[in-house]
Every structure is written in structure tokens, then in C-alpha cells.
Amino acid sequence: METKEAELDDADYAALADLRFALRKFQAFSDERATQEGLTPQQHQALLALRAAPIDDATVGFVARRLLLKPHSATGLIDRLEKQGYVTRHSNDDDRRRAQLRLTPQASEILSKLSCAHRDEIRRLGPLLTEMLARFV
């Protein structure tokens, strides 16, 4: 069911603005932490997507879908991560055209550090986000 603009009141606009502001603040936190570890925010997101992926799904195509990228952009991103020593490509026994990606120990260490910091920040923000989301119910 689509909500009509006329059904929104000042409180709805304030709630939307507050939520978007909180999400932007979290994104800025995330970007800064990635940069501190020598990664671009997009590289961090790619490493996280690969770490969370089932082993058979850890491909360039998966990264493209998870990061909302065109396949050629995801290929360039993975090429750079591979060149920096964060990702390795492995032939898929069933389909040689489809390389499976794995994080290197260096990438895993950096990602672990970043993920702990993000988890802590989300835990800190949790009550505030819960309160904000409740404004939409």
C-alpha cells in the first residue's frame, strides 16, 4: 500500500529526517573507520560482503549485487583488492569462468577490527534507532 504525501504530517517529516541523519552519522563513522585502516569505504563493504557470503557465493557477481554495482565496477574493485593483497581468486571446479573469492589473513584481521568497532557502535546506537523506528509504527 502506497502512502500518499497528503497523509504525512510534520511529525512524519521530522521522523524521516531524524532517521536519515542517524544513518548518515553511522555511515560517516563507518567511512572514517575504514579510512583509518587504509581502506576505502567501498573496499570495506566488499570485504564484509565476501566474509558474510557462503563460500560458493563469494564471487564478483555477489559483490556487485550486495554493493549495488555494475559487474565491471565490481571487477575493478576486486582487482584492486587483489592487487593490495586483501583478496585471492580461486577457480571454481564446476564453472571455470566463475572465480571464487577469499579474504587473505591480512584482510580478515582488518575486517575483524572494523567489524568489532561497528558492532559496538550499533550497540551504542541501538536504543536510539529503536526509538526512531518506533515513530513509524
Image (tube, rainbow, N blue to C red):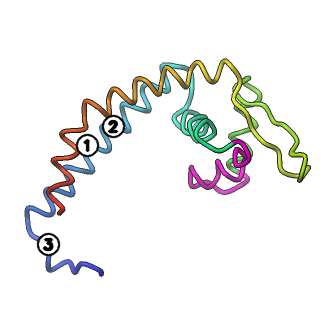
Residue on which the image places disc 2: 26
The image shows residue 132 at horizontal and vertical percentages of 18, 50
| SS for dot 1 | helix
The image shows residue 88 at horizontal and vertical percentages of 78, 31
Residue at the (82%, 44%) spot, across then down: 99
**Residue 112 vs residue 46, the one in the foreground:** 112
Amino acid carrying label 1: it is: Ala
Residue at the (73%, 33%) spot, across then down: 102
The image shows residue 1 at horizontal and vertical percentages of 30, 81
Amino acid carrying label 2: it is: Phe
Instruction: Answer with left or right where residue 110 lies relative to residue 100.
Output: left
Highlighted range, magenta: 55-72
Q: Tags 1 and 2 in contact by the CB under 8 Å rule?
A: yes
| Residue 25 lies in the magenta stretch | no
Residue on which the image places disc 1: 22
Task: Decide whether the magenta segment is chiefly helix, strand or loop.
Answer: helix
Residue on which the image places disc 3: 8
